[in-house]
């Protein structure tokens, strides 16, 4: 991804000990101090995506983690989204439903920007059994007909998707 030119400066006040500590950590990371600090303050989109996916683990309320991932994907401009989802995160949910929800969200976000979905999504097998986001049987026909295509392809029937809030 092309870097934008640096035309502005930001100064912060630190103690000599803090400056030395930042310089030491930057050297250990193989970066100059500016790059080191920027990477921590404004992490690359891929790291943010990986962090949000890692939050979708059993034992937590996955709905909130998925909502945070949803907001992240919806907020990314096309170039940042492409960068963010280029690689499958190392920490990937073992739960097939959660994995398919994330995959469908990524596919939909890419489609909304006219981007080709990343190739690694093909490795995530769609669910064999349909999953509906509501236990109300009366809503199933609505969900069947209104779920976005990436969700339907994965046998997930939802009413809200990337960028939507419920």
Image (tube, rainbow, N blue to C red):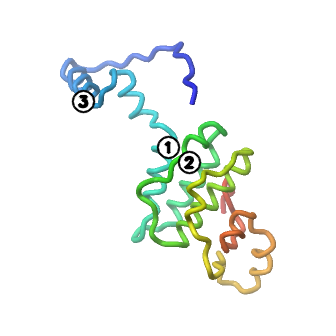
In the image: residue 21, left or right of residue 31 = left
Question: Mark 2 and mark 1: span between their CA atoms?
Answer: 6 Å
Q: Position of residue 136 (x, y in %)?
A: 69, 84
- The quadrant of the image that shows the N terminus is top right
Residue 85's tag is 2
Return the residue nearer the eye: 151 or 65: 151
Is tag 2's residue or tag 1's residue first in the polypeptide sequence? 1
For label 3, the residue is: 28
Question: Mark 3 and mark 1: span between their CA atoms?
Answer: 22 Å
* Residue in the image at 25% along x and 20% along y: 19
Against 5, is 25 above or below? below
How many other residues sit within 10 Å of disc 1, few (<14), some (14-19) or many (≥20)? some
Q: Position of residue 155 (x, y in %)?
A: 67, 74
* Residue in the image at 76% along x and 85% along y: 138
Return the residue nearer the eye: 127 or 142: 127
Asked if the residues shown at circle 2 and circle 1 are in contact, with their CB atoms under 8 angstroms apart, the answer is yes
Q: Position of residue 88 (x, y in %)?
A: 50, 53
Against 137, is 154 above or below? above
Return the residue nearer the eye: 7 or 91: 91
Q: Position of residue 137 (x, y in %)?
A: 72, 86
* Residue in the image at 69% along x and 48% along y: 116
In the image: residue 68, left or right of residue 91 = right
- The quadrant of the image that shows the C terminus is bottom right
Q: Give the number of marks.
A: 3
* Residue in the image at 30% along x and 27% along y: 30
Asked if the residues shown at circle 2 and circle 3 are in contact, with their CB atoms under 8 angstroms apart, the answer is no
In the image: residue 46, left or right of residue 80 = left
Is tag 3's residue or tag 1's residue first in the polypeptide sequence? 3
Residue 69 sits in quarter: bottom right
For label 1, the residue is: 46
Is tag 2's residue or tag 3's residue first in the polypeptide sequence? 3
């Amino acid at each position: 991804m092309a870097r934008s030119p640096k035309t502005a400066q930001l100064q912060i006040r630190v103690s000599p000990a803090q400056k030395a500590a930042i310089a030491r950590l930057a050297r250990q990371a193989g970066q100059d101090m500016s790059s080191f600090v920027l990477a921590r303050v404004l992490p690359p989109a891929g790291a943010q995506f990986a962090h949000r996916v890692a939050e979708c683990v059993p034992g937590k309320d996955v709905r909130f983690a998925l909502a945070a991932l949803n907001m992240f994907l919806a907020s990314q401009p096309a170039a940042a989204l492409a960068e963010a989802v280029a690689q499958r995160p190392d920490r990937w949910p073992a739960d097939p439903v959660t994995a398919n929800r994330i995959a469908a969200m990524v596919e939909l976000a890419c489609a909304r920007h006219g981007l080709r979905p990343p190739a690694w999504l093909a490795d995530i097998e769609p669910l064999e059994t349909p999953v509906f986001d509501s236990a109300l049987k009366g809503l199933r026909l609505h969900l069947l007909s209104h779920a976005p295509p990436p969700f339907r392809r994965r046998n997930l029937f939802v009413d809200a998707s990337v960028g939507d809030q419920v």
